[in-house]
């Protein structure tokens, strides 16, 4: 069942669990993630990032992901991740995405507010949810030159009030694309943010979050936890093993089977750590 982010996150912020947003790049990982969610009878978010959009037109991605979502036995949100251009957001909404993230984190505060408000106006008119970012979650690769900045609690409050976003990404110690679980979470900062705003919070770069922190974060107002690299590593590394084990196999559908099973297992593991599937 295809839902928007607001519907997927209903009641999640104040609960003792959180919903993962997984970056997916095509049919195989999208289906594997949805199978994991179905095993746990839990909602899930399929996310499209810039790399995916550069590889496949967003209109085609939308058709694949929305069809997978509509076919699912659980609520599935189809979300555009880290969009920095108005035009890409508009195309995603037109193509059927039920949620968009506008990422103005590299812009001055007032400009981020102004642009996010415009996106919220457009998206809400189409029943599409909006996530935005305040502070800036950096990248583990310094050559990407993204300016990282921790979220100031007072800014989070003002930003949430002025924009009317459905979810807010905050920078509290994580970094994108970490390959090990070494992030140091600033719980004091998270608590200070929560004291000032009730908006459901989003943690990016959660591949780098330790298992015990995933469990702990889900008990805060954290509603959405973004995970990308962990699934990419499982898919790619399993694929390499399969190719090494079967050097004469050239049929991609055969080679995709084991990576799909392993992605499903990894997605299920992360969901269980986030407290879903307790039943
Ligand atoms: O927006 C996407 C996420 O923040 C994924 O981050 O690849 O480090 O898990 P990650
Ligand atoms: Zn992110």
Image (cartoon, rainbow, N blue to C red):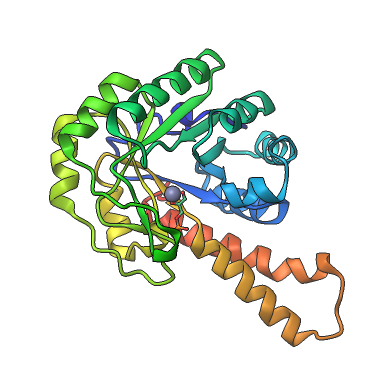
127 to 18, vertically: above or below: above
Q: Which image quadrant: the N terminus? A: top right
Image position of 68 (left or right of 214): right
Looking at the image, which is closer to me, 232 or 36? 232
Name the outermost residue toward the top: 125
Residue at image position (74%, 66%) is 256
Q: Percent x, y for residue 118?
A: 44, 19
For image coordinates 41% across by 25% down, the residue present is: 115
Left of 180 or right of it: where is 237? right
User: Where is residue 234 drawn, in percent x and y?
Assistant: 57, 69
Residue 93 in percent (x, y) is at 61, 26
Q: From this viewpoint, is residue 277 visible? A: no
Up the image or down, 53 lies above or below 164; here it is below
In the image, residue 246 sits, relative to residue 168, either above or below, namely below
What percent of the width, then of the height, locates residue 8? 47, 33
Task: State the residue in front, 46 or 37.
Answer: 46
Nearer to me, 74 or 145 = 145
Is residue 166 among what the camera can see?
Answer: yes
* Numbered disc total: 0
Residue 130 is left or right of residue 156, and the answer is right
Quarter of the image where one finds residue 182: bottom left
Q: Examine the image and state in which quarter residue 169 appears.
A: top left
What residue sits 52% from the left and 31% below the top? Answer: 99
Quarter, ligand 1: bottom left
On screen, residue 141 versus residue 189, left or right, reads: right
Q: Quadrant of residue 94?
A: top right
Residue at 44% from the left image edge and 70% from the top image edge: 179
């Amino acid at each position: 069942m295809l839902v928007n982010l607001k519907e997927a996150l209903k009641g999640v912020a104040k609960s003792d669990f959180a919903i993962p947003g997984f970056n997916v790049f095509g049919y195989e990982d999208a289906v594997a993630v949805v199978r994991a969610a179905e095993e746990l009878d839990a909602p899930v978010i399929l996310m499209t990032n810039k790399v995916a959009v550069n590889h496949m037109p967003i209109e085609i991605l939308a058709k694949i992901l929305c069809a997978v979502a509509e076919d699912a036995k659980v609520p599935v949100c189809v979300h555009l991740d880290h969009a920095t251009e108005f035009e890409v957001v508009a195309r995603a909404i037109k193509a059927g995405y039920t949620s968009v993230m506008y990422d103005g984190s590299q812009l001055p505060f007032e400009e981020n507010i102004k642009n996010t408000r415009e996106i919220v106006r457009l998206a809400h008119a189409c029943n599409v949810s909006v996530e935005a970012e305040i502070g800036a979650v950096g990248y583990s690769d310094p050559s990407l030159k993204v300016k990282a900045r921790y979220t100031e609690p007072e800014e989070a409050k003002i930003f949430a009030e002025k924009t009317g976003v459905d979810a807010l990404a905050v920078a509290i110690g994580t970094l994108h694309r970490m390959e090990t679980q070494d992030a140091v979470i600033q719980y004091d900062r998270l608590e200070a943010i929560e004291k000032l705003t009730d908006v459901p919070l989003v943690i990016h770069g959660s591949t780098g979050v330790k298992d015990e922190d995933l469990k702990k974060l889900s008990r805060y107002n954290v509603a959405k936890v973004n995970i990308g690299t962990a699934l990419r590593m499982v898919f790619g590394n399993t694929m390499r093993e399969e190719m090494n084990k079967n050097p004469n196999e050239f049929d991609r559908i055969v080679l995709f089977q084991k990576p799909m099973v392993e992605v499903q297992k990894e997605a299920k593991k992360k969901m269980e750590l986030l407290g879903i599937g307790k039943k």
